[in-house]
């Protein structure tokens, strides 16, 4: 029995929670063997952090070529372990060789030492098709791997020195697990935008789902790394979450932040998020319509079907030892407040709507935002950031 199981929590992916941090006494000798320094991109830094703290357990470093190719082809490593997306380090430095010890730096910090054990030039078209279901550069992640990532991928073990200094403090999986109730359901809610009333209704009502225990809790776990260009900045999102946590003061909600860079990979991303949240102690995962979906930058057409991510996550949940909680399609009605769209239609209730575009226009114009749509604390943060 693992420590997690004996504490009444779900076991991490692969059975054990990885911690790649090097003891302070070993740091000097480790740095003495470094052959060169490499600056991390924002995305690299997120991946390094999640490797070091065990968010990507059971990985102990960036994937070797064989695991990369296996995950691209069939969302599993060569050992058969589920993984939604490959975890690799990219570079354009052709002089890096197998056996090199790289000091990975980020904005003046020394994050980790990587021992290069695998080096290859990937077939990015094959990666795009396998991971994102398209080779179109109209997909944000296809554009990312084609234009941002270097032409060489590196795999190898990681030894952590320090975690990136962030505006939003990201609790480690071990720290989050220490806050969770033993033997109870822990429902993960993933988001990358400020939380409005409909989101809050959605994840608090998830606690009443038939497959969630009576004393279960929700872990609101927003991603705060790089995301789509038009998304609200992570620092601003962080402020909205912090203010909202104080405003709602709900004992059945846990709040933490995830240093993860979104790929908008639909089904593959849903699986990746489930695996990460399992490592943070979650037993259940809320899957919304078109989760982590995106649209063509030219036609505006969706790359994934509205239930593709839900179906894919549900099909793999049992193997992970997790359960999914489908996202309710909630609408606000004048008569009964938030209800399901089906209920509103059956009763002939009057639905009120406010689009994201309208909301942003009202924010900029200083108009009063209806409280049924957004929390006052969130509106205040967004207005301050926009001003």
Image (cartoon, helix red, strand yellow):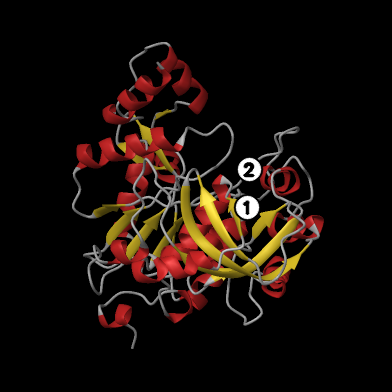
Q: Can see residue 74?
A: yes
Left or right position of 384 against 357: left
Q: Is residue 370 above or below residue 51?
A: above
Q: Where in the figure is residue 248, as x and y percent of width and height?
A: 22, 40
Q: Residue at x 70, y 34 (%)?
A: 300
Q: Quadrant of the N terminus?
A: bottom left
Rendering quarter of residue 34:
bottom right
Q: Where in the figure is residue 58, as x and y percent of width and height?
A: 49, 74
**Residue 294 tag number:** 2
Name the foreground residue: 58 vs 12. Answer: 58
Q: Where in the figure is residue 241, as x and y percent of width and height?
A: 32, 40
Q: Is residue 367 above or below residue 372?
A: above
For the residues labelled 2 and 1, the Cα–Cα distance comes to: 8 Å
SS type, badge 1: loop
SS type, badge 2: loop
Question: Mark 1 = which residue?
Answer: 265
């Amino acid at each position: 029995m693992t420590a997690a199981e004996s504490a009444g929590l779900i076991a991490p992916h692969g059975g054990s929670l990885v911690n790649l941090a090097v003891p302070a006494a070993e740091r000097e000798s480790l740095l003495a063997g470094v052959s060169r320094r490499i600056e991390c991109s924002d995305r690299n830094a997120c991946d390094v952090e999640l490797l070091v703290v065990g968010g990507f357990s059971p990985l102990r470093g960036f994937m070797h070529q064989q695991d990369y190719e296996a995950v691209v082809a069939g969302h599993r490593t060569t050992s058969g372990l589920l993984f939604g997306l490959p975890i690799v380090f990219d570079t354009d430095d052709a002089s890096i060789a197998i056996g090199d010890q790289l000091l990975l730096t980020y904005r003046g910090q020394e994050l980790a030492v990587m021992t290069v054990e695998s080096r290859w030039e990937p077939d990015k078209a094959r990666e795009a098709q396998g991971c994102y279901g398209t080779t179109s550069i109209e997909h944000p992640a296809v554009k990312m791997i084609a234009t941002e990532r270097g032409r060489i991928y590196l795999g190898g073990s990681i030894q952590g020195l320090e975690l990136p200094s962030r505006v939003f403090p990201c609790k480690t999986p071990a720290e989050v697990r220490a806050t969770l109730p033993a033997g109870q359901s822990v429902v993960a809610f993933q988001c990358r935008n400020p939380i409005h009333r409909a989101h809050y209704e959605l994840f608090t009502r998830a606690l009443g789902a038939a497959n969630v225990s009576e004393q279960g809790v929700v872990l609101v776990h927003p991603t705060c790394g790089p995301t789509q260009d038009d998304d609200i900045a992570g620092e601003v999102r962080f402020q909205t979450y912090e203010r909202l946590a104080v405003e709602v003061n709900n004992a059945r909600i846990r709040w933490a932040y995830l240093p993860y860079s979104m790929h908008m990979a639909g089904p593959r991303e849903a699986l990746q998020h489930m695996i990460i949240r399992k490592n943070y102690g979650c037993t259940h995962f809320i899957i919304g319509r078109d989760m982590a979906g995106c649209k063509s930058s030219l036609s505006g057409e969706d790359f994934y079907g509205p239930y593709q991510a839900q179906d894919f996550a549900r099909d793999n949940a049992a193997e992970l030892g997790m359960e999914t909680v489908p996202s309710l399609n909630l609408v606000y009605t004048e008569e009964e407040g938030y209800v399901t769209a089906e209920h509103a239609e059956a009763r002939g209730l009057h639905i009120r709507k406010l689009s994201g575009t309208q909301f942003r226009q009202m924010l900029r114009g200083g108009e009063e935002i209806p409280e049924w749509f957004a929390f006052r604390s969130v509106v205040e943060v967004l207005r301050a950031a926009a001003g």
